[in-house]
Image (cartoon, rainbow, N blue to C red):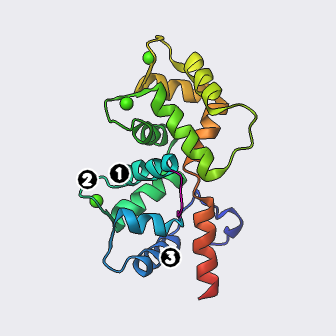
Amino acid sequence: MGNASSSTVDDLQAVEIHHWYKKFMIECPSGQLTLHEFKQFFGLRGLSEQANSYVEQMFRTFDMNKDGSIDFMEYVAALSLVLRGKIEQKLRWYFKLYDVDGNGCIERHELLNILKAIRAINGCDRDISAEDFTNRVFEKIDANGDGELSLEEFVEGARKDEEFMEVMMRSLDLTHIMTMIRNRRHSV
Ligand SMILES: [Ca+2]
Ligand SMILES: [Ca+2]
Ligand SMILES: [Ca+2]
């Protein structure tokens, strides 16, 4: 106790988990979040086709046992990884998220689609187009130049390239969700 000033998202308290649990059970009394509920949960409606497929990919990444729904354990595992996992763990997570067809590497079109989806959801404050940004990333981190990013290239590259890292971190930025949960808590 007594260290309240440092209670940021990176030290996730039991009380926080409890509130997520409440939120989860309110939105999802069955305890199993389907894709449809997942979108509602995160307030994602009226998305473009691209943003939609990104959200679906995120859903599949959360659904670790692949049974088509997210239970509370999967939800907490995902959130705590995103909010306070080690860089290496996070990067592996992002890799899985970005490798949409699951073939073990990220192709150019996979990265491009993801970047477009992120922009559609989060907005974009950059001058550079998603296409140019993708090309730049591949120039920098596709070490063997085969047009695909292996897990190794991805992890190494992201560590070296701050700009790319920042874009990725933002792609799973759950700050607005935390805010939503906090607001709900205060209004109860
Ligand atoms: Ca599941
Ligand atoms: Ca792939
Ligand atoms: Ca490569």
Asked whether mark 2 and ligand 1 are closer than 8 Å, the reply comes as yes
For the point 51% across and 39% down, the residue is 114
Tell me where the magenta segment starts and ends, as one range: 44-48
Work out whether 23 lies above or below 77: below
Label 3 C-beta lies within 8 Å of the nearest ligand 1 atom:
no
Disc 2 marks a residue whose amino acid type is Lys
Quadrant position of the N terminus in the picture? bottom right
Is 146 located above or below residue 110 in the figure?
Answer: above
Disc on res. 66: 2
Residue 129 spot, x, y in % from top left: 67, 32
Residue drawn at 45 percent across, 41 percent down: 89
- Residue 187 in the image: state x and y as whole percent: 63, 86
Q: Disc 2 or 3, which lies upstream in sequence?
A: 3
Q: Which residue is mark 1?
A: 60
Q: Is residue 127 left or right of residue 75?
A: right
* Dot placed on the residue nearer the N-terminal end, 3 or 1: 3
Q: Disc 1 residue type?
A: Arg
Judge whether 70 appears above or below 88 on screen: below
Q: Which mark is residue 10?
A: none
